[in-house]
Amino acid sequence: MNLQLDQLLADTSPNILKSKRKTLKFLLQAYQAGTPGMNTKPKTDILVKQGAFTFHYGCTDPEMRTLTSWLLTNSPSRKKLAKIIPKLWKRHGKEDLKLVGLLLANLNKEDLKEDPWIVFIHLFNKSEPLETILEIAEEMNRSENKIPDDEWLIAMAQQSDLWHQVAMLFISVRSQGIGELKQLVISAPTGGELFEKIRNSLLKSNT
């Protein structure tokens, strides 16, 4: 339990969720409130150099889930809440991307006006942090929004090198593993150390 975040949520009118601008500003306050101890200054310097995130407050997983629950409960409509997802991804703070994953796991096709996985992959920039993509995929797959079927993954992989790599990551998350998609995994463009470890693990599991 985080008393500071709980107090902020209790004191905040749900009316702010009617405005995307006010919602985005409020979320920064919530991330800060959900950060333990004195660690409330966003860690921009290191992370900007790494090129992964524009900021990282250090808001913990339980607090992010509390915040997400508050948003889902108090938003005037889930369709309206879905509209902040591209804004969050564009801002690209670590907590922003975490929140995107939690929202995509809890919103359905009707809320998003599109399949959640289509929404997810169309958010990507030219490069994205692998760990974050995995985390979001795992979060979504634990919900009712399971990873799409083989045909969908094959079609996705044919669109670009990045999508091919991400399709392989999606395969690593699903319960059935590599299945009939060994060639997709083998032919995925070369990635970093963690990516190649995941590839090797998938191929070994198929032998």
Image: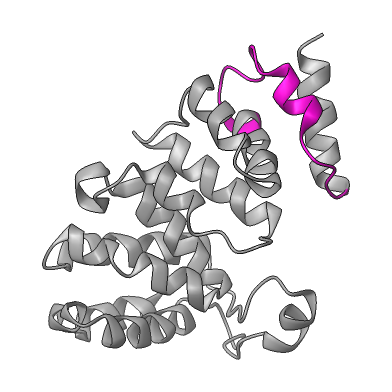
Q: Position of residue 43 (x, y in %)?
A: 67, 85
Q: Position of residue 146 (x, y in %)?
A: 42, 31
Looking at the image, is 207 positioned above or below residue 52?
above
Residue at horizontal 74 percent and vertical 27 percent from the top: 185
Q: Left or right of 127: which side holds 117? A: left
Residue at horizontal 62 percent and vertical 56 percent from the top: 132
Residue at horizontal 53 percent and vertical 43 percent from the top: 137
In the image shown, does 143 or 20 lie closer to the viewer?
A: 20
Q: Position of residue 177 (x, y in %)?
A: 63, 20
Magenta stretch: residue 179 in it? Answer: yes
Most common SS among magenta residues = loop
Does residue 1 appear in the picture of this structure? no
Location of the C terminus by quadrant is top right
Magenta stretch: residue 60 in it? Answer: no
Q: Left or right of 48: which side holds 125? A: left
- The boundaries of the magenta stretch are 172-192
Q: Position of residue 159 (x, y in %)?
A: 59, 41
Looking at the image, is 185 positioned above or below residue 88?
above
Q: Quadrant of residue 76?
A: bottom left
Does residue 196 appear in the picture of this structure? yes
Location of the N terminus by quadrant is bottom left
Residue lying at the far front in this picture: please name it: 159
Looking at the image, is 112 positioned above or below residue 137?
below
Q: Quadrant of residue 17?
A: bottom left
Q: Left or right of 44: which side holds 110? A: left
In the image shown, does 187 or 18 lie closer to the viewer?
A: 187
In the image shown, does 90 or 5 lie closer to the viewer?
A: 90
